[in-house]
């Protein structure tokens, strides 16, 4: 340590820069090794002790006159720890910035394993996940097919039945369970590696190809539960994906015992005055007219969505880069938030969104990787075209969604801010602007909906099992059904629901 009366005479002297070495550490990972020169460590310690000496009051010494050696003895441990943490923070931040390392998150440095040496340089290293490096494909002149959607009487009738189903009630069924029914059951879950079991009483399980049983996703529920009646017991084992949002079950096998208590079926709502009043109409004909208007607007949105999906497919198929599993797992919740925002922008009702989110949570690592890949692609496109979003644009989109749901824009914005999705909403708005920019120069031709080219299967890093393919098909069909919009509802009907 410097002599206690020694003062730095040259406050502007240049220090030797840190020695930084950057190397690859796997897919989308960089290893950063840093050596902080001894003089930098020495000067930092001197600085801290001088600050402490200036303010410290010790028995027997006037303020600012305490000996450095005494300060070292009494406060050395705290000062050393403080200096070490400050050097770690500033050195790691500078290393990332100076070497243009686009880290996905802050460095995770185990400071307890780093020593502040009495002599010589201070050394440490860390690894960070970084944005993938890739080249964008050509973005001009993409061939896009625009479907011509026609609103037929049959579509109006289907939408009317869908409304009745959503307003319907689940009643006991006198007979075996079939696809589309629900079963009420007690469920016991035994997780691999756990000595305890989790028991859930009287939960409802949808009889469909894939869905949730208690807290875990299960494939083949239609085959497992088809034909059951009260009193039956079924057992199955599910392999929870390695990127599942719930860490308790992530990447583990879960044994399930399902004790069926009751089978339920959906009874559509009756077409009576009470049902019609929910939508502010006086008769079935007026409701159908309103449905036809809604479906016409929806057809325009569907055409835009179809073109958007073609752009996504083009970008996905013509852009290659890898993503480590760790990044996919950590981003799963963020992806779910973006999906939530997307459905919100489509004007879906909250109960529909909640039900669809259940399917999305059961999504495999392929789905998570695909969404993350598109995020990086769209982020790079936004940078290429210098596309940003303004508060006015964001507020405009919020006002549009609020209008479709009969809500006040300021209340909608408060909800988005409260649940943490406002930032994701802004990203979604920026992404829409990117798609619009690409479509400006695209070669667009109108075709019948059934003739629109289907996007090629998504390229993933793992082979899909037959069950996963079925699950994706089920999700696609469910999403298609849920995209149907409801007629605008009156304030009176909203209050009645509340």
Image (cartoon, grey):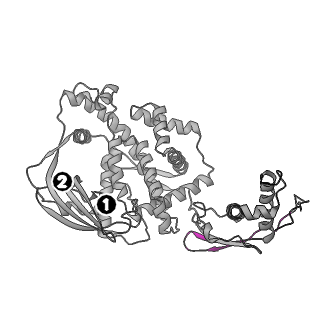
- Residue at x 83%, y 65% (from the top left corner): 15
Query: Looking at the rendered structure, which numbered label has been put on residue 234?
Result: none
> Between residues 94 and 487, which one lies in front from this camera angle?
94
Q: Is residue 161 visible?
A: yes
| 321 sits to left or right of 53 | left
Q: Position of residue 329 (x, y in %)?
A: 45, 63
Q: CA distance from mark 1 to mark 2?
A: 16 Å
**Is residue 383 within the magenta segment?**
no
Query: Looking at the rendered structure, which numbered label has been put on residue 216?
Result: 1
Rendered position, 470 above or below 306: below
> Between residues 32 and 273, which one lies in front from this camera angle?
32
On the image, numbered disc 2 is attached to which residue? 183
| 244 sits to left or right of 35 | left
The quarter in which the C terminus is drawn is top left
The residues colored magenta run: 14-36
> Between residues 121 and 231, which one lies in front from this camera angle?
121
């Amino acid at each position: 340590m410097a002599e206690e009366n020694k003062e730095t005479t040259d406050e502007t002297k240049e220090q030797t820069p840190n020695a930084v070495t950057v190397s690859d550490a796997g897919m989308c990972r960089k290893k950063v090794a840093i050596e902080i020169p001894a003089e930098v460590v020495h000067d930092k310690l001197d600085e801290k002790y001088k600050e402490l000496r200036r303010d410290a009051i010790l028995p027997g010494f006037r303020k600012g006159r305490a000996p450095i050696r005494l300060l070292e003895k009494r406060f050395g441990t705290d000062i050393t720890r403080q200096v070490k943490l400050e050097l770690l923070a500033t050195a790691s931040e500078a290393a990332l910035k100076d070497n243009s390392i686009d880290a996905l998150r802050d460095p995770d440095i185990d400071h307890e394993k780093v020593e502040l040496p009495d002599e010589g340089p201070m050394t440490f290293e860390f690894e960070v996940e970084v944005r993938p490096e890739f080249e964008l494909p050509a973005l001009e002149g993409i061939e896009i097919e625009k479907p011509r959607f026609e609103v037929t009487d049959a579509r109006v009738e289907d939408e009317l039945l869908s409304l009745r189903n959503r307003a319907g009630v689940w009643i006991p069924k006198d007979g075996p369970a079939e696809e589309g029914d629900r079963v009420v059951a007690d469920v016991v879950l035994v997780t691999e590696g756990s000595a305890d079991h989790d028991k859930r009483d009287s939960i409802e399980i949808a009889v469909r190809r894939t869905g949730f049983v208690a807290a875990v996703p299960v494939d083949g529920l239609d085959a497992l539960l088809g034909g059951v009646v009260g009193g039956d017991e079924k057992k199955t084992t599910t392999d929870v994906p390695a990127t599942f949002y719930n860490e308790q079950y992530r990447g583990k096998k879960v044994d399930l015992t399902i004790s069926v208590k009751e089978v339920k079926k959906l009874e559509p709502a009756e077409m009576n005055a009470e049902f019609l009043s929910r939508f502010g109409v006086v008769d079935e004909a007026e409701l159908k007219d309103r449905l036809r208007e809604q479906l016409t607007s929806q057809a325009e949105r569907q055409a835009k969505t179809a073109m958007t999906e073609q752009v996504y497919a083009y970008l996905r198929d013509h852009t290659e880069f890898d993503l480590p599993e760790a990044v996919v797992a950590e981003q799963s919740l963020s992806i779910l938030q973006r999906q939530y925002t997307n459905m919100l922008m489509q004007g879906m009702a909250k109960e529909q969104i909640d039900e669809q989110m259940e399917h999305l949570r059961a999504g495999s690592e392929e789905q998570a990787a695909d969404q993350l890949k598109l995020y990086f692609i769209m982020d790079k496109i936004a940078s290429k075209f210098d596309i940003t979003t303004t508060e006015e644009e964001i507020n405009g989109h919020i006002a549009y969604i609020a209008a479709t749901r009969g809500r006040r824009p300021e209340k909608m914005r408060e909800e988005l801010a409260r649940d943490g999705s406002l930032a994701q909403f802004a990203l979604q708005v920026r992404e829409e602007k990117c798609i619009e920019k690409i479509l400006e120069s695209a070669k667009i031709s109108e075709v019948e909906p059934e003739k629109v080219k289907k996007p090629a299967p998504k390229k993933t890093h793992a082979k899909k099992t037959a069950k996963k393919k079925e699950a994706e098909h089920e999700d696609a069909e469910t999403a298609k059904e849920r995209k149907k919009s409801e007629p605008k509802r009156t304030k009176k009907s909203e209050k009645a629901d509340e």
